[in-house]
Image: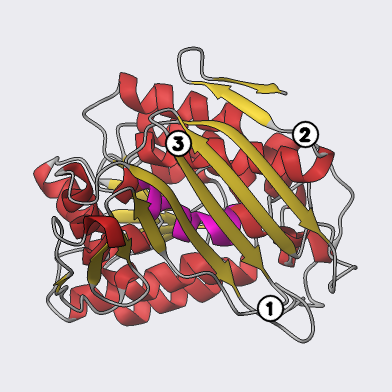
Amino acid sequence: KIGVIGTGGMGTGHCDGFINSANAGAEKVQIVAVCDVCQSHLDRAYDKCVKGQKDVAVERTTDYRKVLAREDIHGVLIATPEHWHSKMAIDAIAAGKDVYIEKPMTLRLEEAVTLHDTALANPSTIVQIGTQQVRLPKFIEAQKLIAQGMIGTPTMSQTSYCRNNKEGEWLYYAIDPAWEPGKNLDWDAWCGPLGKIPWDPQFFARWRRYRAFSTGIIGDLLVHVLTPLMYAVDAGWPTRVTCAGGHYVDKVMENHDTINMTIEFEKGHTMIVAGSTNNETGLEVLIRGHKGNVYLGGRHCVVRPERIFSEELESKTIQCDDIGNDQDQHRLGWLRSIRTREKPIADVVLSTKVMVAVDLATRSAWDGHAYKFDPATMKALRV
């Protein structure tokens, strides 16, 4: 039995996913509670859960604490805007619930560190972050062969998340003229940890475009590609990050529409990451080693030697299964972890490392400075 907290587009999509998995016989799971501060979002998810689940009583509430107070609920999925992620996840852990947190794990690094420490202090609790591409077999195979030393020392890697939109990114989230704070939407509750903010339907529907609520491309898009690549390389904590960004096309959006990150890691590795919402041509997904390279642009994991090591290392393609929809598999993986108590692949430690890169890159993009991170103190410092 699970509850879904935050039933906007992503949360309602998760409801559909759980229901479809249950009806297909892939899992025995029931959504027994849904929560949102917007009545139309809440009613839509409630109707889906009632119609899609036979003989399941579903509670709807605007107060997430009521969901956490239910003793019959095993886990909660948090799909709220990211400024609520840390508070709700920590409250869920305190309530003894397993947690699936949509990406990014938190809005700010300090929140990530607090959640990281809380989760590690409660090791019996399952905490998974919604970065589903880490489930793709090619990244799992890449991690194995890099750990075996097949490509020698992994020195540099690159990835990107680039897409294009004529009107501007995230404007496809519609604004409902019927929204009325105090009547069918609790705006103060939505703002929550950020404090009181004047009502603006643009903030509510399209918060990813604004600096106060989101890190934009970096936290919303690049976490998807950062997480599996960091998992595969396994180079430890990011220790130095620089980022250049700009408003080149979508000048109305407050967050940047173009981003280029450089991340240095404690074990000696550099990662280059590009993001754009105004051009869909990205970088080749590649991990470079001093003996060979791993190509991850397709479904399979392809290894090719550097020219001077061609007699020592043969070209090799590791065939990887088509797992279907990776988000479906990520949800099922969380449910398996709830049953088996095995640590999920997108756990809080990996996701905190990702948040170090996200937060420091965001700071660097805005102020032009490089930032360092000390894993011993879990503190960031402007260079």
Kindly identify the amino acid type of the residue bearing the numbered disc 1. Answer: Asn
In space, the residues marked 1 and 3 are separated at their CA atoms by: 27 Å
Up/down of 121 relative to 352, above or below: above
Q: Decide which of tag 2 and tag 3 comes sooner along the chain.
A: 3
Where does the image place residue 303, in percent across and percent down from the top left? 23, 65
Task: Tell me the residue at 67%/29% (across/down).
Answer: 371
Q: Secondary structure at mark 2?
A: loop
Kindly identify the amino acid type of the residue bearing the numbered disc 2. Answer: His
In space, the residues marked 2 and 3 are separated at their CA atoms by: 20 Å
Residue at label 2? 369
Q: Decide which of tag 1 and tag 3 comes sooner along the chain.
A: 1
Residue at label 3? 353
Looking at the image, is mark 2 or mark 3 nearer the viewer?
2
Where does the image place residue 88, in percent across and percent down from the top left? 50, 39
Say whether residue 221 is magenta: yes
Q: Which residues are magenta?
A: 219-230
Q: Which mark is residue 279?
A: 1
